[in-house]
């Protein structure tokens, strides 16, 4: 599920010492409370990562879940 509303890729997310959330769908890294940026292919892995879901992928996942729930109750 690609993230459609993310800016240009970054080569190194800011502050590599903190824990970074990585979107489990599109693999974008959260760099602050409102910004998710894609990691470039072949980039060095972040030292401390956790799972997360960016806002765009979250919206898509919720829409899919609602459709599946509606299908079960029909």
Image (spheres, grey):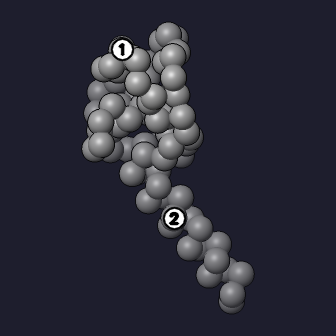
- Residue farthest toward the bottom in the current orientation of the protein: 74
Q: Based on the displayed image, in which of its 4 quarters is residue 39 positioned?
A: top left
27 on left or right of 15: right
- Residue farthest toward the right in the current orientation of the protein: 72
Q: Up-down: is 18 above or below 44? A: below
Q: Which residue matches tag 1? A: 11
As drawn, the label of residue 62 is 2
- Residue found 51% across the figure and 64% down from its top: 62
- Residue found 42% across the figure and 46% down from its top: 54
Does residue 27 show up? Answer: no
16 or 4: nearer the eye?
16
Q: Residue 74: percent from the left, percent from the top?
A: 68, 89
Badge 1 or badge 2: first in the primary sequence: 1
- Residue farthest toward the front in the current orientation of the protein: 18
Does residue 68 show up? Answer: yes
Q: Up-down: is 9 above or below 51? A: above
Q: Based on the displayed image, in which of its 4 quarters is residue 14 positioned?
A: top left
Q: Based on the displayed image, in which of its 4 quarters is residue 40 positioned?
A: top left
Provide the secondary structure element on which disc 2 rests: helix
As drawn, the label of residue 37 is none
- Residue found 30% across the figure and 43% down from its top: 33
Quick one: label 1, few (<14), some, or many (20+) residues within 10 Å? Answer: some
The Cα–Cα distance between marks 1 and 2, rounded to whole angstroms, is 30 Å
1 on left or right of 56: right
Q: Residue 46: percent from the left, percent from the top?
A: 49, 18
Provide the secondary structure element on which disc 1 rests: loop
Quick one: label 2, few (<14), some, or many (20+) residues within 10 Å? Answer: few
- How many badges with numbers are in the image? 2
Q: Residue 12: percent from the left, percent from the top?
A: 36, 15
65 on left or right of 35: right
Q: Up-down: is 56 above or below 26? A: below
């Amino acid at each position: 599920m690609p993230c459609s509303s993310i800016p240009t890729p970054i080569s190194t997310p800011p502050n590599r010492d903190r824990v970074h959330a990585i979107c489990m769908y599109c693999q974008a890294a959260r760099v602050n409370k409102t910004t998710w940026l894609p990691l470039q292919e072949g980039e060095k892995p972040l030292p401390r990562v956790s799972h997360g879901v960016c806002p765009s992928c979250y919206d898509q996942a919720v829409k899919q879940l609602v459709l599946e729930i509606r299908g079960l109750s029909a």
